[in-house]
Amino acid sequence: MYSFKLEAINDNVVQRYKSEKKTWPDWKEKPPSPWVAKITGISKKYGYEREFMECKKDYSDANRAGSRGVYFYWVLDDGIYEVQELRPRKKPLRYFIETTGRGKTGIETIEESRVKACLLENAILELVCSTQRDKELLGHLTHSLASQCLILAERIQQSCCTL
């Protein structure tokens, strides 16, 4: 299990929106909020199948208005996640993380190509393996194959860009 936190910048505006049920001129529907979603597969409509994770709010460092210092905390298990992080006076930042157990926090930022390689690896395992033991035995081989495909794709992209 891993702990992950993001600041809920302008949380006071989000709360006001929810209580008044109004739309805001700067946003199509509602003010943005930070979120974390576990990637569970591929979706034709959204790109990825996602399971949005529940969070806990912490107001202990909040300023009086609640516009800064409000934090959302998530408890994550092993997997790959998409994150929406709010930034002051900028559009929200979207990126991917993987819970790896390495480093200080056990969480690493990863490229979208790594997400696709992991989904490919999982799809191959589901097609080929009938038991959990088969999946474990072939998991290392499939991971290596997906990594090699990713390296090859990056080399092809680099060679095309240099022509």
Image (cartoon, rainbow, N blue to C red):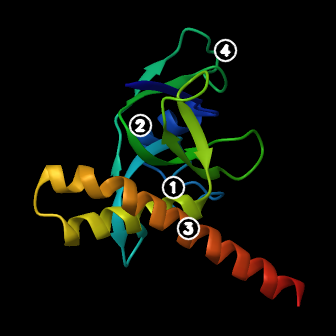
Q: Is residue 28 something that shows in the picture?
A: no
Q: For the C terminus, which image quadrant? A: bottom right
Quarter of image, res 123: bottom left
Residue 153, image x and y in percent?
Answer: 63, 77
The span from disc 3 to disc 4 (Cα, nearest Å) is 49 Å
Q: Are marks 1 and 3 in contact (CB under 8 Å)?
A: no
Residue 17, image x and y in percent?
Answer: 49, 42
Q: Are marks 3 and 4 in contact (CB under 8 Å)?
A: no
Q: Is residue 16 left or right of residue 151?
A: left
Mark 2 crowd level (few <14, some 14–19, many ≥20, 10 Å Cα): few
The span from disc 1 to disc 4 (Cα, nearest Å) is 25 Å
Q: Earlier in the sequence, mark 3 or mark 4?
A: 4
Q: Is residue 3 above or below residue 39?
A: above
Q: Is residue 107 above or below residue 90?
A: above
Residue 45, image x and y in percent?
Answer: 38, 76
Pointer 1 residue: 23
Tell me what residue is drawn at x 30 percent, y 70 percent.
Answer: 124
Residue type at mark 3 is Gln
Residue type at mark 4 is Asn
Q: Earlier in the sequence, mark 1 or mark 3?
A: 1
Pointer 4 residue: 63
Pointer 2 residue: 19
- Looking at this view, is 18 or 128 the one in front? 128
Element on which disc 3 rests: helix
Mark 1 crowd level (few <14, some 14–19, many ≥20, 10 Å Cα): few
**Foreground tag (1 vs 3):** 3
Q: Earlier in the sequence, mark 2 or mark 4?
A: 2
Q: Which mark is residue 148?
A: 3
Residue 16, image x and y in percent?
Answer: 50, 36
Tell me what residue is drawn at x 34 percent, y 35 percent.
Answer: 54
Residue type at mark 1 is Thr
Element on which disc 4 rests: loop
